[in-house]
Image (tube, rainbow, N blue to C red):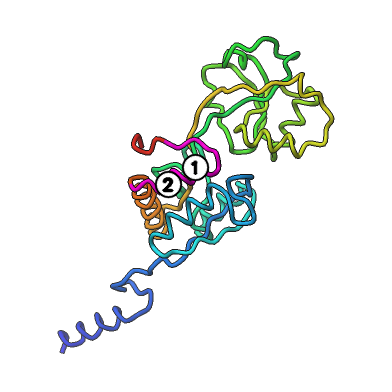
Amino acid sequence: MIKYFAIALATFLLMLPGGICNAEEEKVTSVLAVGPSWDKFTNEDGTGLYHEILNKVFGLYGIEVKREYMPSIRAYKLVAGGDADMMTCKAYSVDKPLALARYPMFVNHYHVFFNKDRIGPWHGRKSLNNKFLVWRVSYYLPSEFQDVDIQFRELTSGQQALGMILLGRADFYVDDINFIEDSINKNRIPFDPTRYDIQTVGTRSYHPVFNTSERGREIMKLYDEGVRKLHKTGELKPIFEKWGFEYPDYDSY
């Protein structure tokens, strides 16, 4: 009697949707990617480097990619809370329950925008020593400037950071060259471009952010395997060439 009861109970548990003994995992049919709308990366018309990479990667599995645009801080919170599957993109380590994928979606130099009269002759990163730097919230870390003694402030937008330089309230605005140009295009403060300069100060790679939950790890695995496959077949490089960006050395990751 006890034997038959045990068999019946096991059968019942297996039949429960989402039960602890559910023998088949839920299949991923769509992923929700969140983050800001960046020109040439995540244009709101669905074009851009990040959009096309994700569509190509998850298209290998017949998975639909959905996108919602929002500030980076909110995007991180949604992924951490399990309300979104991934955030594009972040350049340095994250804390649990978040994790960075192995393969980046973008590799590029980062730059500083500054007033030449204020800074004087450019001497590379040494010119940052004992200076006041500004950048967007969560985009950079003080640890990325350990070789120089700096003060810094995080701001909510590139336009605000640019304004700090134009108004003489900071020494350097740190950002990707594309974002600096976007901030300049959106700027409303009159200035003479000949008095300012942009110089390279470092290189970094940008990786999508996932949750370390079971679903998050599965989607991150699909992403990494998809990128590796598309790299090997040569299908990924044309996307970078189309948007005019440097192709990452995927073999080194």
Q: What label sits on residue 31 in the rendered view?
A: none
Q: Residue 29: x, y in percent? A: 43, 67
Between the residue at mark 1 and the residue at mark 2, the CA separation in whole angstroms equals: 7 Å
Q: Amino acid at mark 2?
A: Leu
SS for tag 1? helix
Q: Residue furthest right?
A: 190
> Does the magenta run of residues contain 188?
no
Residue drawn at x 42%, y 47% as measured from the top left? 236
Q: Depth check: 6 or 39 in front?
A: 39
Amino acid type for the residue under numbered disc 1:
Phe
- The location of residue 104, given as percent across then percent down, is 44, 41
* Magenta region: 233-248
Residues marked 1 and 2 touching at CB (< 8 Å): yes
Identify residue for label 1. 240
Whether residue 235 is in magenta: the answer is yes
Neighbours of disc 1 within 10 Å: few (<14), some (14-19), many (20+) = some
What is the quadrant of the N terminus in the image?
bottom left
How far across and how far down the image is residue 178, in percent? 62, 36
11 left or right, relative to 152: left
Q: Which residue is mark 2?
A: 236
Residue depicted at x 49% and y 35%: 246
